[in-house]
Amino acid sequence: MSRTNISTGAKWEDIVGYSRAVKIGNLIEVTGTVATDNSGELVGKNDVYIQTKFIILKAEKVLEQLGANLKDVIRTRIFTTDISQWEAIGRAHGELFRSIKPCTTMVEVSALIEKDYLVEIEFTAVLEEK
């Protein structure tokens, strides 16, 4: 099976040695994604709803590069530094995944890569076999 790696130029990719997404066969994994725009700036400081929605839309663009879309997502893993904000996170997730309903997990962690990131999400997608 062929392997396709997608990089976005995030400062951490070369330091840590990872790709934004990897596709092998019909399986796509999107690495933990935070609310950083193309210029490396945080989107939605102090707002888990805005960060969550931005992250999902950012992942959607990566999936599209690999011939997939949000309908192909079968699992999301949501990490937050404040689980008491689960409803706002869930609202943003639900707005984009309500009809798709992937498996999901939401857990609280003590910190993310930088203090202003409140949410990080991983995605697993599977393309239909042709």
Image (spheres, rainbow, N blue to C red):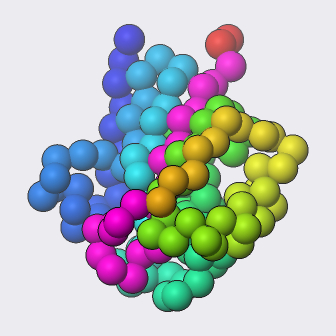
- Residue visible at 43% across and 30% down? 23
Is residue 40 rendered magenta in the image?
no
Number of dots carrying numbers: 0
Q: In the image, is 43 to the left or to the right of 14?
A: right
Q: Is residue 108 visible?
A: yes
Q: Nearer the viewer, residue 98 or 63?
A: 98
What is the quadrant of the C terminus in the image? top right
Is 126 rendered above or below residue 102?
above
Q: In the image, is 86 to the left or to the right of 65?
A: right
Q: Residue 7, position in %: x, y?
A: 32, 51
- Residue visible at 58% across and 44% down? 105
- Residue visible at 71% across and 37% down? 102
Residue 38 placement: quadrant? bottom left
Main SS of residues in magenta? loop
Question: In the current view of this chain or complex, which residue is farthest to the left?
Answer: 15
What is the quadrant of the N terminus in the image? top left
Is 94 rendered above or below residue 19?
below
Question: In the current view of this chain or complex, which residue is farthest to the bottom?
Answer: 45
Q: Residue 8, position in %: x, y?
A: 35, 58
Q: In the image, is 88 to the left or to the right of 25?
A: right
Q: Residue 4, position in %: x, y?
A: 37, 31
Question: In the current view of this chain or complex, which residue is farthest to the front?
Answer: 84
Is residue 127 rendered magenta in the image?
yes
Q: Which residues are magenta?
A: 109-128
Is 125 rendered above or below residue 41?
above
Q: Nearer the viewer, residue 75 or 129?
A: 75
Is 100 rendered above or below residue 81?
above
Q: Nearer the viewer, residue 99 or 70?
A: 99
Q: Is residue 63 visible?
A: no
- Residue visible at 71% across and 72% down? 88
